[in-house]
């Protein structure tokens, strides 16, 4: 594959993901807007902290997508489609187990979450109302990871994008109806997520098996699904990504925790800015997601030229898009913030730190792309080790800088964190090439 055709292929696969990923952070932005325009900032604070907690929980199981992509892409490259069917059954079994465990242990998870944050009585009340409903979205949200992983691995990014878009749009619609028309406040946004995620999971799991049937017959062979050797391999990959994902989500929880130690208003303002950072992340992840499938396919088919081209061109596309997002934020940041809140104090605080949303999209574009490359190659130990180093240095920087420069120090440390993730993975990049002749 030529350099030009490599760029065209990445763009072709990325465009549907781009539009789907654009919708995902809109859920958080709409929820923030719904809560930020109520008469009490506690609604917004409770929702943002609860969302952070569930991000830690669910994104810790991000291996259900990331691990699936690499294995599916490599099986697709070597035309071993029965392995893909068995992998889906293995992951669904795991999701059922995890979901039941989270629901049964919800009381203890709630107590741990409350022990981390110092919340007022009113904020605690709203936090509890959100938590007790959102925990039931576990099966739906975790199943969506599997669905998107399968279709990205098959380089059918349009299907994964439709699934993500369906989940996000129905989530937004349900939340608006429950909050505005039924006056359910924080319970409304939580209930919207529960219903939309469950609906999406059921519809698209059925569709997944319908599509896989085109490649191979769908048989529930328990001996192959629960083959000890395959389970061990899957576990080895998944545990590395679990550690990596847990550390990543912890870093954002830690950011919220240190912000909370300054004030609840700082948490609310930072949440608004983080929503815009996450919007840019989901846009840039379109390139990372499409790269995952091509990298996995190139390794499965032993195509070193394809691998080289996709790595080089994906960085060009990602960095250029990151720079464009930074320019858009520079021009419109105050307008974007005003959409999400009309609370004067929160708006003023958000304006004060808004220059960070201009800096971070370009800086972070490199680490997102490295993630995609290593996920597609199933080089999960490197992902884990790079994240351990990055988070360790980030924590030290965040504690020192927050103590010295308050909220500005927090944002400096977050920027350092993104840079460290890219540099540490760049160090490990040659190991991918060692797998090819």
Image (tube, rainbow, N blue to C red):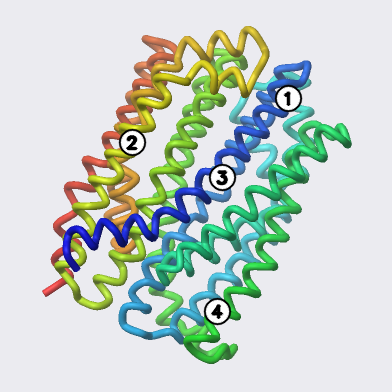
User: Element under label 4?
Assistant: helix
Q: Earlier in the sequence, mark 4 or mark 1?
A: 1
Q: How crowded is the residue under tag 4: few (<14 C-alpha within 10 Å), some, or many (20+)?
A: few
Q: Earlier in the sequence, mark 3 or mark 2?
A: 3
Residue 422 position within the rendered picture, expressed as x and y whole percent measured from the top left:
26, 41
Query: Real-space Cα distance between discs 4 and 2?
Result: 34 Å
Q: Quadrant of residue 293?
A: bottom left
Q: Is residue 35 above or below residue 97?
A: above
Q: How crowded is the residue under tag 1: few (<14 C-alpha within 10 Å), some, or many (20+)?
A: many
Looking at the figure, which quarter contains the N terminus?
A: bottom left
Query: Real-space Cα distance between discs 1 and 2?
Result: 32 Å
Which residue position holds label 3?
A: 24
Q: Earlier in the sequence, mark 4 or mark 2?
A: 4
Which residue position holds label 1?
A: 43
Q: How crowded is the residue under tag 2: few (<14 C-alpha within 10 Å), some, or many (20+)?
A: many
Which residue position holds label 2?
A: 322
Q: How crowded is the residue under tag 3: few (<14 C-alpha within 10 Å), some, or many (20+)?
A: many
Q: Looking at the image, which residue is at 56% across and 24% down?
A: 272
């Amino acid at each position: 594959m030529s350099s030009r055709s490599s760029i065209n292929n990445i763009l072709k696969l990325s465009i549907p993901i781009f539009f789907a990923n654009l919708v995902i952070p809109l859920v958080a932005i709409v929820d923030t807007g719904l809560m930020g325009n109520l008469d009490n900032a506690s609604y917004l604070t409770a929702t943002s902290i609860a969302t952070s907690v569930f991000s830690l929980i669910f994104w810790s199981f991000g291996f259900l997508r990331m691990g699936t992509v690499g294995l599916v892409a490599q099986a697709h490259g070597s035309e071993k489609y029965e392995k893909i069917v068995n992998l889906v059954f293995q992951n669904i079994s795991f999701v059922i187990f995890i979901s039941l465990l989270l629901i049964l242990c919800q009381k203890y998870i709630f107590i741990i979450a409350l022990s981390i944050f110092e919340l007022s009585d009113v904020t605690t009340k709203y936090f509890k109302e959100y938590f007790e409903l959102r925990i039931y979205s576990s099966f739906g949200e975790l199943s969506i990871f599997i669905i998107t992983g399968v279709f990205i691995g098959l380089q059918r990014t349009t299907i994964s994008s439709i699934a993500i878009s369906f989940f996000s749009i129905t989530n937004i619609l349900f939340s608006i109806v429950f909050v505005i028309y039924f006056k359910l406040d924080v319970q409304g946004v939580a209930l919207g997520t529960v219903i939309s995620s469950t609906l999406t999971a059921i519809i698209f799991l059925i569709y997944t098996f319908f599509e896989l049937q085109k490649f191979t017959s769908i048989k529930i062979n328990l001996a192959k699904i629960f083959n000890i050797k395959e389970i061990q391999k899957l576990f080895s990959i998944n545990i590395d990504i679990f550690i990596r994902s847990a550390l990543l989500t912890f870093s954002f929880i830690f950011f919220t925790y240190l912000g909370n130690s300054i004030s609840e208003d700082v948490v609310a303002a930072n949440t608004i800015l983080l929503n815009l950072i996450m919007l840019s992340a989901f846009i840039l992840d379109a390139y990372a997601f499409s790269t995952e499938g091509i990298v996995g396919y190139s390794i499965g088919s032993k195509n070193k030229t394809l691998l080289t081209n996709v790595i080089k061109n994906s960085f060009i596309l990602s960095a250029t898009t990151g720079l464009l997002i930074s320019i858009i934020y520079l021009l419109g940041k105050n307008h974007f913030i005003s959409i999400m809140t009309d609370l004067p104090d929160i708006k003023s605080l958000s304006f004060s730190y808004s220059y960070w949303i201009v800096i971070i999209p370009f800086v972070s574009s490199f680490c997102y792309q490295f993630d995609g490359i290593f996920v597609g190659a199933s080089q999960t130990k490197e992902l884990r080790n790079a994240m351990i180093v990055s988070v360790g240095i980030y924590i030290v920087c965040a504690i020192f800088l927050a103590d010295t420069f308050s909220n500005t120090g927090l944002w400096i440390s977050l920027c350092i964190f993104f840079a460290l993730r890219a540099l540490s993975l760049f160090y490990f990049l040659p190991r991918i090439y060692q797998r090819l002749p």
